[in-house]
Image (cartoon, rainbow, N blue to C red):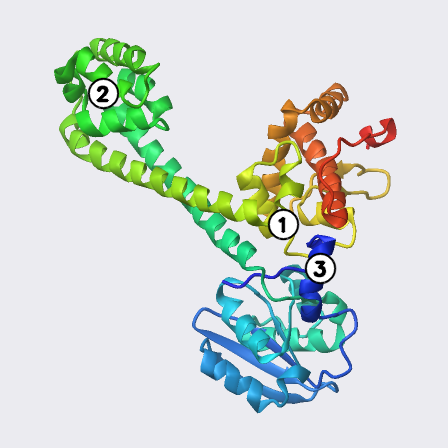
Amino acid sequence: MPRHTPHRWLPKHRQHEREDNVVTLNNNPPEIEVFIGLDVGKGEHHAVALDPGGKHLLDRALPNDEGKLRALLAELGNPTRILLVVDQPATIGALPVAVAQAAGTHVAYLPGLAMRRIADLHPGEAKTDARDARIIANAARTMPHALRSIQIADEQVAELAMLCGFDEDLAGQITQFTNRIRGLLTQIHPALERVLGPRLDHPAILDALEHYASPAGFRAAGEKRIANRLIKRAPRKGRVWAAEIIAALDAQTVTVTGTNAATLVLPKLDAQLTAFRDQRDEVAAEVERLVEIHPLSPVLTSMPGVGVRTAARLLTEVTTKHFPTAGHLASYAGLAPVTRRSGSSIRGEHPSRRGNKILKRTMFLSAFAALRDPVSRGYYDRKIAQGKRHNQALIALARRRSDVLFAMLRDGTIYQAPAWSDQALTA
C-alpha cells in the first residue's frame, strides 16, 4: 500500500533523493489546467474535474480499476498538467494515488476535518459522492492552502505501516482470546484461574493448558508431571507453578456444570492464542529489521522510552507528514491543550479530544516508559507536585517530548537531555 513521505524528514545527506517528487501546494503550479476531485470508495469512486475558471469538464462515477483511472487521466489531457485530489490517500484511495503518480500527475489530498469545514460553505445538506467530489475539486482550485502534498512512498515506511496495523490487530485478538480463556476458567474453577489466568502470556502455561485441557487433566497428571512439563519452558518457575496448580485444585472439590464442554473448548482457544502470539513474534522480528535499516532509526531510538514498536509508529505517523513547527506536531498528536474561554465564567485549558489517536497513544505510552529516565522522571514529579493527576502529568511529559522529537527530526540529531527551564516546567 503506498504511503507518503515528505522529504524534509530525511537526513540532510539523503534529502536530494526526494527533490524530484516535491509538489508545492501553497499556490497551485501555473501549469495546472485540470483539477480533479475524487471521492474514493471501496468499489467505485466519483470524479469531478474543473478547469481553472470552475467550468465542469467531467462528472461521473469511476470504477476502482487501474485501466479506468488511466483512461480518465488520458481523456483530460496532459497528465503532468492535472492535479488529482483525494479525500483518502491510503487504503481505498491507494490505487488512484499510485496510478496518478505513475502517470506523472500531481497528487494531493484534502484532510477530513478541512473537508467537513469546506462542505459547510457550500449550499445544500445532501451527503452524496458527487457533491463531495465537487467540493474536493473546487477546494483544489480555490483553496490550495487546505491541501496536503503526497510524495512517492518510502518502501520501508509503507511496509512498516502495514505490519504495524497487522500487529495491532493481532494484539486485539490476543486480548480477546485471553479474556475468553480466563472467563471459562473462572466459570468452572476460579481457584485454578487465579493461578493460570495472570500467566497466560507465558509459553509454559499455554503449553500446559493445551496439553492437560481441564482441572481433571491437571489432577490426573499430578504435580511431578506438571512440573516436568513446565520446567522445559520455565526452568526457574516450573516447580513453583506446579505446586500452586495442585493447591488450587485442592481448593475446589465440586465439579461445576459445563466443565465437560469447557474441556473441549479450552484447548482450541489455547491453540489459537498460541498461534496469534507466534504470528506477533514473526511480525515483531520483521518490524525490528525494517526499523534498524531505516536511516532515522538511530535518531528515534536514541530517545528514552522509544523502542522498536514505538519507533515504527513514529516513522509511519510522524515522518510521513509535514509539520512547520513543533506546535503543529503536538496539535496533530492531540497533545496540545485547548483553551476554552467565554467572558469571565468559563476559563481554562483542557486536553484535546482530536488529533491522531494512534500517535497520541504512542506518545503517551512512550512517556510512561521514559519515567525510568532521570530527566523525564523529574519533569513528571514536578507536574505531580503541582497537583496534576498521573495521566495529566504523563500527557504534559508527552507534550514536551513531542517538542524534543520535532527538533531531533528537523536537525537529524540524536537525543540530548533537554535543559527545560523553570518557566517551561510551569507551562
Residue 337 in view (yes/no)? no
Q: Which mark is residue 235?
A: none
Residue in front for this viewpoint, 319 or 109: 319
The residue to which callout 3 is attached is 15
Image coords of residue 81 (percent x, y): 68, 84
Residue 141 lies left or right of residue 296; in this view the side is: right
Instruction: Please say if the residues under marks 2 and 1 sit with CB atoms less than 8 Å apart.
Output: no
Q: Residues within 10 Å of mark 1 (few under 14, many from 20)?
A: few
Displayed quadrant of residue 207: top left
Image coords of residue 160 (percent x, y): 51, 51
The residue to which callout 1 is attached is 295
User: At label 1, which amino acid type do we have?
Assistant: Pro
User: At label 2, which amino acid type do we have?
Assistant: Arg
Image coords of residue 281 (percent x, y): 40, 39
The residue to which callout 2 is attached is 229
Would you place residue 199 above or below residue 409 in this image?
above
